[in-house]
């Protein structure tokens, strides 16, 4: 198994859009609820993941957020708009000259992505958040923009005290809307930022970047009986003092990433051209515990662990077993990669 830390940076063209001049009722023909008026609509941005502050380098991505919700488009005075394109723009309105805008947490910024694939939204200008082409009267549209925002670590050290902190964005943000080629932009509404996780400030970190679990040569009958298990451990260190380690272990979670995580929560093997075992999966569980669903977060406090001074040691087991009760197992090589990411609550 491997723990990876990946940082991707992109520098793409800035999109300049017209400024707000007046309120045009046509720009409210697509709205977040049937009775919403111009300027009173809402688009939800939901924080979907969040790493501890100390888990990423400066300029690294701490967490990601998606835009969710729905729009209903309709109105008797909109006959000239149907069949055209409707756009919602975002204005972070926090004043910075770049793309990483301030939040209400020291050392944490937020960067908004343009929904049209044109890079990031400047903190002091507009960017496209959502677009509908060929609008149909009476139609309800899903407003789903994955990865619309990223929380960014902006400095090495924060003045925030150790513990967990609520994530809040700048309240001056605004959303406008317009019909390209027909109207200028005007007030549409606000971003509602939802964070059901908190930022963890704690110096604990993975002691090593990679853990290899080797099953070696095993018997097919043993695999069929689910009797092939291999222990492995994960260590978190650098916590400073034991109380920091205990706090971290009590509030942090592990999140699992792999292209081969199955719907049942087990890990499938990596496909290969020849010589691969078939009909097997890998189950992961804390030593002495029950299987972990790798599609869900795993609370560290529910594991098998020991804490000494500034170090936390977690004992896990990888189990090679049949994919289903009726699977026919073919002998061969078994490879799998699982990325483990520390998550805040």
Image (cartoon, rainbow, N blue to C red):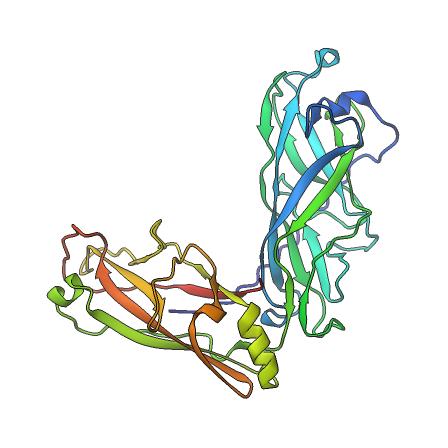
Is residue 15 something that shows in the picture?
no
User: On screen, 24 above or below 88?
Assistant: above
Question: Along the horizontal axis of the image, is 210 left or right of 275?
Answer: right
User: On screen, 152 above or below 178?
Assistant: below
- Asked which quadrant contains residue 251, the reply is bottom right
Looking at this view, is 170 or 241 the one in front? 241
Question: Along the horizontal axis of the image, is 44 left or right of 231?
Answer: right
Seen from this angle, which residue lies furthest bottom? 309
Q: Quadrant of the N terminus?
A: bottom left
Q: Position of residue 279 (x, y in %)?
A: 20, 55
User: On screen, 254 above or below 306?
Assistant: above
Q: Position of residue 109 (x, y in %)?
A: 72, 59
- Asked which quadrant contains residue 60, the reply is bottom right
Is residue 141 something that shows in the picture?
yes
Q: Quadrant of the C terminus?
A: bottom right
- Asked which quadrant contains residue 101, the reply is bottom right
Q: Position of residue 327 (x, y in %)?
A: 17, 52
Looking at this view, is 251 or 334 the one in front? 251
User: On screen, 144 above or below 285?
Assistant: above
Q: Residue at x 76, y 73 (%)?
A: 159
Question: Along the horizontal axis of the image, is 222 left or right of 205?
Answer: left
Seen from this angle, which residue lies furthest right? 21
Q: Position of residue 189 (x, y in %)?
A: 77, 35
């Amino acid at each position: 198994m491997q723990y990876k830390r990946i940082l991707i940076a992109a520098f793409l063209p800035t999109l300049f859009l017209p400024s707000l001049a007046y309120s045009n009722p046509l720009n409210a023909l697509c709205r977040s609820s049937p009775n919403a008026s111009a300027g009173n609509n809402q688009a939800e941005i939901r924080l979907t993941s969040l790493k501890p502050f100390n888990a990423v380098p400066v300029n690294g991505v701490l967490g990601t957020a998606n835009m969710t919700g729905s729009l209903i488009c309709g109105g008797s005075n909109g006959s000239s708009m149907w069949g055209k394109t409707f756009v919602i723009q975002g204005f972070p309105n926090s004043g910075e000259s770049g793309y990483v805008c301030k939040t209400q947490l020291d050392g944490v910024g937020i960067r908004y992505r343009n929904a049209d694939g044109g890079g990031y939204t400047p903190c002091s200008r507009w960017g496209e958040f959502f677009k509908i082409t060929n609008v149909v009267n009476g139609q309800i549209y899903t407003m789903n923009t994955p990865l619309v925002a990223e929380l960014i670590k902006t400095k090495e050290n924060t003045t925030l005290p150790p513990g967990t902190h609520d994530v809040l964005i700048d309240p001056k943000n605004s959303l406008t809307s317009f019909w390209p080629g027909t109207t200028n932009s005007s007030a549409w509404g606000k971003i509602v930022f939802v964070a059901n996780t908190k930022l963890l400030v704690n110096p604990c970190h993975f002691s090593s970047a990679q853990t290899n679990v080797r099953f070696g040569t095993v018997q097919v009958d043993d695999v069929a009986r689910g009797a092939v298990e291999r222990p492995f451990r994960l260590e978190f260190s650098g916590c400073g003092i034991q109380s920091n380690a205990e706090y971290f272990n009590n509030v942090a979670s592990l999140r699992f990433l792999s292209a081969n995580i199955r719907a049942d929560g087990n890990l499938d093997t990596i496909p290969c051209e020849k010589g691969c075992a078939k009909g097997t999966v890998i189950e992961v569980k804390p030593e002495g515990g029950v299987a972990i669903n790798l599609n869900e977060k795993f609370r560290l406090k529910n594991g098998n662990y020991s804490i000494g001074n500034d170090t936390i040691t977690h004992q896990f087991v990888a189990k090679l077993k049949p994919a289903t009760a009726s699977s026919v197992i073919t002998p061969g090589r078994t490879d799998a990669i699982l990325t483990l990411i520390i998550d805040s609550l």
